[in-house]
Image (tube, rainbow, N blue to C red):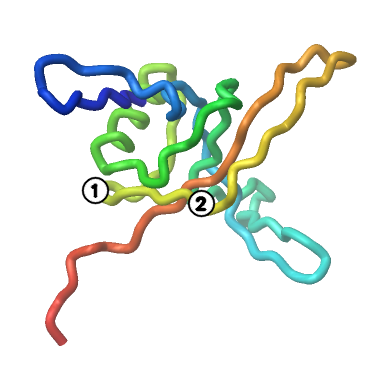
């Protein structure tokens, strides 16, 4: 994710080091939550049905996720995913808003895994109102 911000005099740009600029994206499973927890949806063949929500992880645990991913950012994320032979299901032409408070999973020395920060983004409803 490109997070360049213009300086106040517009003669140069600086990189915002407080915002996550590298992450991995995957779809979440569609389903519902009840008193017993999450119940995933499956098709007739038993394959999980995926949603257009995006589960995002990063190793940049000291940085913040952006609140909103613009339609242009989503398009770039999908293009990057496709260049790596992976398909993301997304709502085209809409922004994605952070849906859950980001959490940090601590490093695990036994398993040799680094600390990661993760959250979920959901598509924003169409912002073009119609007259009724």
In the picture, the quarter occupied by the C terminus is bottom left
In the image, residue 79 sits, relative to residue 56, either above or below, namely above
Depth check: 4 or 83 in front? 4
Depth check: 97 or 51 in front? 97
Left or right side of 28 for 91? left
Distance from the alpha carbon under mark 1 to that under mark 2: 16 Å
In the image, residue 119 sits, relative to residue 57, either above or below, namely below
Left or right side of 57 for 38? right
In the image, residue 64 sits, relative to residue 108, either above or below, namely below
Depth check: 13 or 89 in front? 13
* Residue position for label 2: 51
Residue drawn at 41 percent across, 51 percent down: 97
- Residue 90, image x and y in percent? 38, 45
Seen as rendered, the residue at the extreme front is 9
- Residue 98, image x and y in percent? 47, 49
The quarter of the picture where residue 12 lies is top left
- Residue 131, image x and y in percent? 12, 82
Residue drawn at 33 percent across, 63 percent down: 125
Residue drawn at 19 percent across, 25 percent down: 6
């Amino acid at each position: 994710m490109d997070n360049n911000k213009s300086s106040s005099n517009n003669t140069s740009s600086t990189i915002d080091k407080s915002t996550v600029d590298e992450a991995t994206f995957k779809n979440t499973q569609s389903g519902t939550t009840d008193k017993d927890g999450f119940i995933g949806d499956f098709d007739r063949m038993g394959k999980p049905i995926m949603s257009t929500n995006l589960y995002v992880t990063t190793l940049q645990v000291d940085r913040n996720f952006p609140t909103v991913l613009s339609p242009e950012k989503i398009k770039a994320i999908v293009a990057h995913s496709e260049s790596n032979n992976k398909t993301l299901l997304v709502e085209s032409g809409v922004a994605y808003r952070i849906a859950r408070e980001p959490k940090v999973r601590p490093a695990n020395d036994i398993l040799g895994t680094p600390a990661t920060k993760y959250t979920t983004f959901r598509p924003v409803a169409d912002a073009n109102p119609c007259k009724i």
